[in-house]
Amino acid sequence: MSNPLLRVDNLQAFYDQSHILQGVSLSVNSGEVLSVLGRNGAGKTTLLNSIMAILHKRTGSIIYGDQEINKLPPYKIAKQGIAYVPEIRGIFPSLTVRENLEIASRRGREGASQQQWTLDSVYSLFPHLRERAQSGGGKLSGGEQQMLSIARALMTNPDLLILDEPTEGLAPLVVKEIEELLTALKRQGLTMLMVEQNLGFATRLSDQIVVLGKGRIRWSGTPELFSSESGIQRTWLGV
Ligand SMILES: Nc1ncnc2c1ncn2[C@@H]1O[C@H](COP(=O)(O)OP(=O)(O)O)[C@@H](O)[C@H]1O
Ligand SMILES: [Mg+2]
């Protein structure tokens, strides 16, 4: 059996008086991709923000490797080897592509067990970013920004990459590029936890699918099983 790299147990999360996540448990195995699917407002971003301690009004257990991380601040969680590509891509518009990457690399950690990413190895994976190295972050297209956001995450040398809707708002050709890219990262052994609304994209990339609805896990299983669950898809995803 594969062993979990990340284990979330009975996670409850709150915004003021709203009880958003109501006992979410999941685990992401080393080297695998887990996708969380769900409608708008289901609590997907809240789940990722809770894991990263960006939202800290939460209870439950979050174990990474063999360490409980639910008391750590976001920067310490990042130092443990978790990189987050948020929905709002979070690149610096006034810095160049290269500067954005260099800053991210300083925020990373030493002694990572995965591949040690450098400017050069990131540029070979994203040749387009090399061409745009001197362009301002704010001048990039949506697709380029998403690429840069993923590239920045890699520069921290993560063992776990967390992505919030990496294909949102992107043209089909760019979505295809992102899929190829994440497939290549998966092949290199990178573990990923991803939130997606694009079912085809998520099922092709994932080893496990989790359906989140109104703050609870409504279904989980393999992509193969998920494809035959038309009832679940209709009820919780509206497809
Ligand atoms: N900052 C916030 N303050 C209060 N409620 C929020 C906030 N962010 C999200 N919510 C609410 O939490 C629920 C889950 O939101 P979210 O996690 O963003 O869903 P998803 O990412 O699945 O679309 C929604 O009902 C949303 O209105
Ligand atoms: Mg969201």
Image (spheres, rainbow, N blue to C red):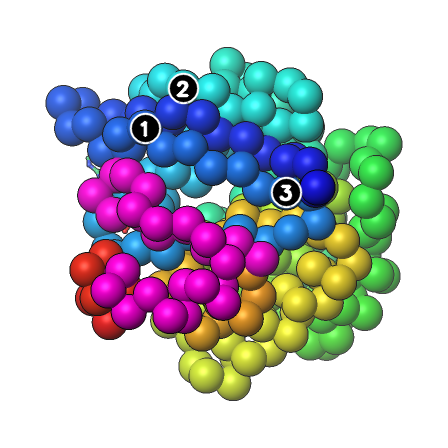
Q: Earlier in the sequence, mark 2 or mark 3?
A: 3
Q: Quadrant of the C terminus?
A: bottom left
Q: Which residue shows up at 28% across the image and 32% down it? A: 21
Asked if residue 113 shows in the view, the reply is yes
Q: Position of residue 144 (x, y in %)?
A: 56, 71
Which residue range is magenta in the image? Answer: 207-232
Task: Identify which amino acid the numbered label 2 is placed on.
Answer: Gly
Q: Report the residue marked by disc 1.
A: 23
Q: Which of 152 and 132 lies nearest the eye of the viewer?
A: 152
Q: Earlier in the sequence, mark 1 or mark 3?
A: 1
Q: Which residue shows up at 76% across the image and 53% down it? A: 189
Give yes or no for contact between labels 1 and 2 (Cβ–Cβ under 8 Å): yes
Q: Is 226 colored magenta in this rendering?
A: yes
**For numbered disc 2, what is the local secondary structure?**
strand
Q: Position of residue 77 (x, y in %)?
A: 59, 27
Q: Is 24 colored magenta in this rendering?
A: no
Q: Quadrant of residue 19?
A: top left
Task: Measure the alpha-carbon separation of dots 2 and 3.
Answer: 19 Å
Q: Which residue shows up at 28% across the image and 69% down it? A: 230
Which numbered tag is attached to residue 55? none
Q: Report the residue marked by disc 3.
A: 29
Asked if disc 2 is less than 8 Å from ligand 1, the answer is: no
Q: Report the residue marked by disc 2.
A: 60
Q: Which residue shows up at 70% across the image and 42% down it? A: 2
Task: Identify which amino acid the numbered label 3 is placed on.
Answer: Asn
Classify 10 Å Cα crowding around label 3: few (below 14), some (14-19), many (20 and above): many
Task: Identify which amino acid the numbered label 1 is placed on.
Answer: Gly
- Left or right position of 178 against 108: left
Task: Measure the alpha-carbon separation of dots 1 and 3.
Answer: 20 Å
